[in-house]
Amino acid sequence: MVVTFYPGFSKKPNSTALPASAAQTQVINGEIKGDFSPYAPVIRFRTIPATSCPTYVYCYIASFKRYYFVAWAFVSGFWEASCTCDVLGTYKGQIRASSQFVERSGSDYDPYIIDGACNPKGQVEFAQAVVGQTAIWGTDYEDGTYVVGVVSCSAGNNIGAVCYYAMSQLGFNALMYALLNSPNWMNIDPSEISTDLQKALINPAQYIVSAVWLPINAATFIGTPQDIPTGADVTTTVRLGWWSFDIQVNCRVLHRPTSEYDSWMRTFVCDLLQHPDTQEFGTWVNLSPYTKVTLDFPPFGCIDLDTTDLMHNLGVLSCRMFIQTYTGDATLYIFAGNIDTDPTHAQMIGSLQANVGVQIPVGQIAINPSNFKNAVVAGAVTGAAELANAVMEGS
Amino acid sequence: MAREKVTIDSGMSSSGAIGRFFGGAADQASEYVQASFPAVNKALDNAIRAASPMVQNVTQALEPAQQIVAGAKTLMSDPLRYLSQAATKAIPAAIAASASLQYTGGQGSFCNFLYPVVVRTKWMRVDGNRAAYIGKPLCKVRPLSVLTGYCKCANVKLDLPGTAQEPTATIEELQIVVLYLEAGVFLE
């Protein structure tokens, strides 16, 4: 029986590797010892000197069409090769031709399947990315916008009884100066009511029913000195009660709730940072618990984002914010993906509500029937008690 | 009869005018009442003085009654002054409560906006790559001819009927091949 040995060839037992066709070979004739099976024959070689231990570990027996692993033994004055069929090498062609359900592979993988065979380490890293290419909020409150609600007779510009003006800090200062510098604008003859009594009796701030500071650059509403928008909504006149004031500073009348100025909307996009092991292990490392993502968006708060939501469109996070400028009430919508450039695939993953405005203290009448009733009762009781006390003292 | 001057507290500036208005009218009315009913005043005064030793000894529960009696006497003696005083106290108290500054902060805040909006990320690193030894998850049906390196299969369905180059596998060999594929082999 002809046995072909492959000097210098070795392989892993669970490998389909075969000797190259041009590999060095050594052909030796041998004889089968005793009963055998093609899977594990024992071959005796009479031509191999007893003093020369064979080093071949792999062979091919053409008669059986099989490759074998070889183990040598010197038995009764002859070298014997105990062969074990290398089934992976022998049937390599048919194995490779088959299709199987592959759980794990060294050459192909699904990056979204969590690999339980990998071990998380106690090594933690932090990173942060700024949302928006430009600052969402200004850094100086004087850059912000004041939206002042004034009870007036500004027909056509009112929301209910109130006309809202968006103005800068400069505009707000000018308005308050116009109101409180002198009571002359009331045109009350000092001979009828003295100037001091006019100041005591009439509080012009009572017409200002709301004042909200918004962290939106005032130029958004009234433009810049170099670029002042035109149109009827940009004015220097503020109507208050029965009066009108020319404050000499531009402000914008807000009277269309669905307009871009009344419902201020902006979208901010942020590139999400990838887990440093993404390239090596797969996208799944961007899931919890390997990754934790927090959106820190004042005043909405710190929002822990579900990393499975972010997998929908990995890499980009969009924040779209609507602010009702009259009140500062705001809604923040968070999207996985770019809602501006790819709205079809952007997926909303959450919404939050907050008030981004800062309520500016303004002296005004607060109508609270409950408080009013309580005050009347308390005052009456106090008066009655003092009355009784005075009676006792008088007695 | 000499009466102690009762001072009306005018309260807030806005209510001062009201207080002064009521106070002035009360002063005039008081003088009129005292001049018109001296006998009534004196009788009531004497009655209270006579009853006072007993009143001082009664329990505290009777004190309101004493005050009522005294109040009635005083009210009779100077009704407009004290009624005006009660009104003067009640009205400015109500006005003062409603004319407070309305300040409803606690929502937005100036300091909130000093900080940028950021996405903070924390990563837990993963142990070194062993893909060369154990591969990575694929979990899909694939022709093994397109794969190289480590390969671990599940639910192997294999038939080795033999070819011109390869023999037909025995059942034992077939079982061994299946075991190898399910345990993980290297396709080379």
Image (tube, rainbow, N blue to C red):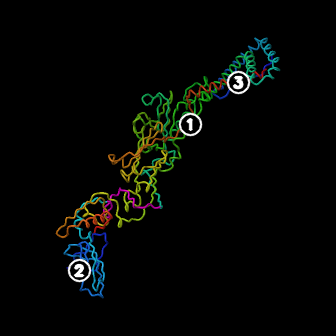
Nearer to the camera, B155 or A117: B155
At a point 23% along the width and 80% down the height, the residue shown is A25
Q: Is residue A94 left or right of residue A208?
A: left
Quarter of the picture containing the C terminus of chain B is bottom left
What residue sits right under mark 2 in the picture?
A: A25
Front disc: 2 or 1 = 2
Among the 4 quarters of the image, the one containing residue B144 = bottom left
Kind of residue sitting beneath label 2: Thr
| Stretch in magenta | A103-121
Kind of residue sitting beneath label 1: Tyr
Among the 4 quarters of the image, the one containing residue B166 = bottom left
Q: Is mark 1 on a helix, strand or loop?
A: loop
Nearer to the camera, B84 or A201: B84
Magenta-drawn stretch contains A210: no
Q: How crowded is mark 1: few (under 14 residues within 10 Å), some or many (20 or more)?
A: few
Q: Are marks 1 and 3 on the same chain?
A: no
Q: Farthest residue in the left direction? A: B164
What residue sits right under mark 3 in the picture?
A: A385
Q: Do labels 2 and 1 share a chain?
A: no
Q: Residues within 10 Å of mark 2 (few under 14, many from 20)?
A: some
Position in image of residue A161 (x %, y %): 47, 28
- In this view, A351 is above or below B38: below
